[in-house]
Image (cartoon, rainbow, N blue to C red):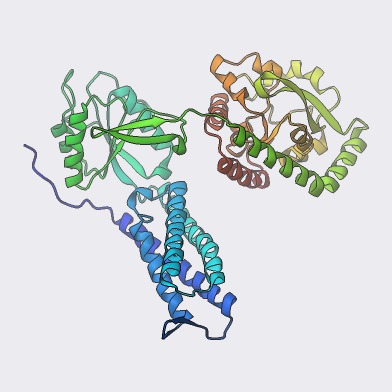
Amino acid sequence: MLKRNTSVRPAAWRDTHIRSLRRVDAAALAATLALTQLVRFGLEPEVLQLGGLTVPYWLVGALLGLAWWGWLDLRGARDVRLIGYSVEENRQVVSATLVFFGALAILSYVLGVPMARSYVVLALPLGVVLLLVARGLVRQGLARRRRAGEAMSRTLVVGRVPGVVEMLGTLQQHPAAGLDPVAVYAPSSGTALPRHLAKVRMPQNMLPAGERPSVEGIVAACREHRIETLVMAASAPLSSEEVRHLSWHLTDAHIRLVLDTGLTDVAGPRIHTQQLAGLPLIHVSTPRMSRSRLLLKRLVDVVGASTALVVLSPVMLVLALIVRTHDGGPALFAQERTGLDGSSFKMLKFRSMYLDAEERKAELMAANDAKGGVLFFMENDPRVTTPGRWMRKYSLDELPQFLNVLRGEMSLVGPRPPLPSEVAMYEEHVHRRLRVKPGITGLWQVSGRDDLEWEQAVRLDLYYVENWSPVQDFVIMLRTVRAVVAKEGAH
């Protein structure tokens, strides 16, 4: 029988972080309601008539702010599980706010409260924006601390050695998750941990060779290493009943339990849970582009590309003149690329290389700097012209591709458009990246472009294909602006 452990483990940074969230939420809501009051009523005192009762609007705003602030707590918008996870935290904040204002509208209607509609119309969007900005600043501070090795949860990884090694590598590559692996608990297999994971300790009292892990041994290891979070790899050799008993003991000891499902590169909206006789089942929805989603994406492409061409036409004219006057060659370069479902099209770019660039490529293949061998890339390619170097730095050579978007050959966002010679070298699974139109920008561009290894670029493209959403496209376009300005991965 295991002894119940009810001691709270030291994690003062969590309490500090949540207190910071409460403070910034209060400041954001106070600023929201003060600005709303000022914009809607100015400096003149306004009142709300409730039957025979007269209530000043500043008091209405104060009560609204207190209720809003408390509702964020009740809805779990400051839960520990959200710490550091920007997308889920923002979703909770927005969801809680919309529910709050929906309930406010219903109550106002039912009780006949004559609240100024413009007051609510101003407060809702302004409050959401200020809350998200304030939360973002707090997360940036947390990220800085975690990069410095602070504000981390002492973590034990449980599973078989191969799964444990994979999980340790993932956790160490992503310190922003806040999980610091300090020990592992796995069956003894004679396999040593890789050198780059040597700092992680194997519990000395772990397991004799051939013995299965036990709930008692895992709990003892947690106590020994002062564990705050336990991560169970998909390879953990525990039955469902043992996992349930383990979760009870971890709850008593205030230790978080994280289960690895073994799923990779699947976006959150595609994952759904369902209870079956007390057993949580995970459903992964099949990725598909419905007609309405395709129509929406095409509409965004047409509007976005048309707007870009109108706004950037003076810039494009100047660039065309610069390319023409540099060596007398054509301003545009049309190159055959592979598009949707393997179709071919001519991708347009401002010419950034000399006219004999293709003929000289063969002699430069030995100097290929691309990681993976499928792509060709040289950091200091001698075929690039002087104007071409600075155009490439800021991706200005790609502006004519908005014409490809209007013609329906490309999209604003999508996988990198490959050369036919590259497609000929694809492994079978890589052809899945051709199931959507290639894009002017994409996850590959905002995640490093030429600095990426081939396997990383393929993984990003396949992730995009499997998990496309309008919100994801919008986020990628925003990140593209930052990547272009910072010249990330551009050569």
Return the residue nearer the eye: 78 or 165.
78
Residue most extreme to the left:
1
Note whether residue 455 is visible. yes
Task: Choose between 3 and 189: the one closer to the eye.
Answer: 3
Residue 200 visible in image: no
**In the drawing, does residue 256 fall left or right of residue 195?**
left
Residue 333 location, x and y as percent? Answer: 83, 29
Q: Which quadrant is home to the C terminus?
A: top right
- Please state the horizontal and vertical placement of residue 403, each as a whole percent of the image: 79, 35
- Residue shown at the point (42%, 62%) measured from the top left: 103
> Is the residue 328 above or below the residue 424 in the image?
below
- Residue at 23 percent across and 32 percent down: it is 277
The answer to whether residue 368 is left or right of residue 305 is: left
Q: Quadrant of residue 77?
A: bottom left
| Rendering coords of residue 401 (x, y %) | 76, 35
Quadrant of the rendered image containing residue 248: top left
Residue 123 x %, y %: 52, 67
Position of the N terminus, as image quadrant, is top left
Q: Is residue 198 above or below residue 148?
A: above
**Is residue 63 shown left or right of residue 233?**
right
Label count reads 0
Q: Residue at x 33, y 22 (%)?
A: 162
Above or below 262: residue 400: below
Residue drawn 39% across the image and 70% down it: 66
Where is 335 relative to 349, above or below? above
Residue 426, picture quadrant: top right
